[in-house]
Image: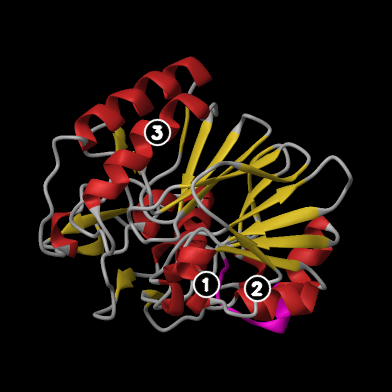
Amino acid sequence: MEPTEMNTAWYVDSRCTNCDVARQLAPGLIEEIDGRAEVVRQPRDEAEVRQLHTAAYACHTRSIRRDGQRLDPGLDPFPLALDTGLYLCGHNSPHTAAANSYLLRRPSGTAMMIDTPRWSEALAARYEAALGPVTDVLITHRDHAAHGRQYADRFGAQLWIHEGDLDAAPDADHVLHGTEPAEIAEGVIAHPLPGHTLGSVVYVADERYCFAGDSFYWSRTTGDLEVADSVTWYSITELAASLARTAGRLRFEWVLPGHGDRKHLPPEEMSRRLHALAARAQTLEPRPVDFTALLW
């Protein structure tokens, strides 16, 4: 890589919505300053240039830029492997509030998509080429449903959503009901978790991966599992009840949220933290929606 490329000034433009995605992918290079993401240090080597490209190709507003230069398409890393068979889609969508989405390869050699990246035929082909046939598109809740039908149709896949959020995907192929867990494929359990929205669902695969939507997430600020009580569209009281009902049923090692950071811990430690979160949630009161109060 030419030194001039490494020395090209990177910056975050004014379209930034402070969604935290870039800071997850380029820590130490991009940080939060005055309620938005900022490049705090220019890259020093090729690895850091790649980190900034990763953040840039995830950014839903395409706000991470280089003076006078285009991004290098050869440095688009997505789908990005997080673990064996687990991938981050990147290319977050402005129509899903910049939510992260994931691909999970199953033992059959097929894959599932959990929530959706921005829609494009080229991206769909890219994901399919990397993982093979995608059989199911799992929507965690209404905020992340925007491109579900497009991806499901392109893949020839089945689209899943809960009845509480069905108006966001009225043409879903499978509708989850009530609050009891349901096995939707071998090793994959849907746990309805009303709270963030009426139809929020947590999907747990192989007692290893927990796709939490916006029900809970890992906060770097607190170093713990947290709920986004400042951005709860349905009921924080119902979310607390859902966590109390469900915490003992969930076993996983990875928390993989739509918003907020990811974390991998031993299952016993995750269980302890989830039970503690359920107890803390009981003390929370309804509050006005305030995105600035999120504990990233």
Q: Is residue 148 above or below residue 230?
A: below
The answer to which of marks 3 and 1 sits earlier in the sequence is: 1
**Residue 62 covered by magenta stretch:** no
Q: Nearer the viewer, mark 3 or mark 2?
A: 3
Q: How is the image coloured?
A: secondary structure
Q: Is residue 227 above or below residue 153?
A: above
Q: Is residue 86 visible?
A: yes
The CA span between labels 3 and 1 is 23 Å
The answer to which of marks 2 and 1 sits earlier in the sequence is: 1
Q: Which residue is mark 1?
A: 166
The CA span between labels 3 and 2 is 27 Å
Q: Secondary structure at mark 1?
A: helix
Which of the numbered marks, if any, corresponds to residue 245? 3
Q: Amino acid under label 3?
A: Arg
Q: x%, y% of residue 203? A: 57, 46
Outermost residue, right direction? 108
Which quadrant of the structure image shows residue 13? bottom left
Outermost residue, front direction? 178
The CA span between labels 2 and 1 is 8 Å
Q: Amino acid under label 1?
A: Leu
Q: x%, y% of residue 184? A: 71, 48
Q: Amino acid under label 2?
A: Ala
Is there CB contact under 8 Å for labels 2 and 1?
yes
Q: x%, y% of residue 112? A: 72, 55
Residue at image point 67% right, 59% down: 113
Q: Which residue is mark 2?
A: 172
How many other residues sit within 10 Å of disc 3, few (<14), some (14-19) or many (≥20)?
some
Q: In the picture provided, is 88 more to the left or to the right than 65?
A: right
Which quadrant of the structure image shows residue 278? top left
Residue at image point 53% right, 52% down: 46
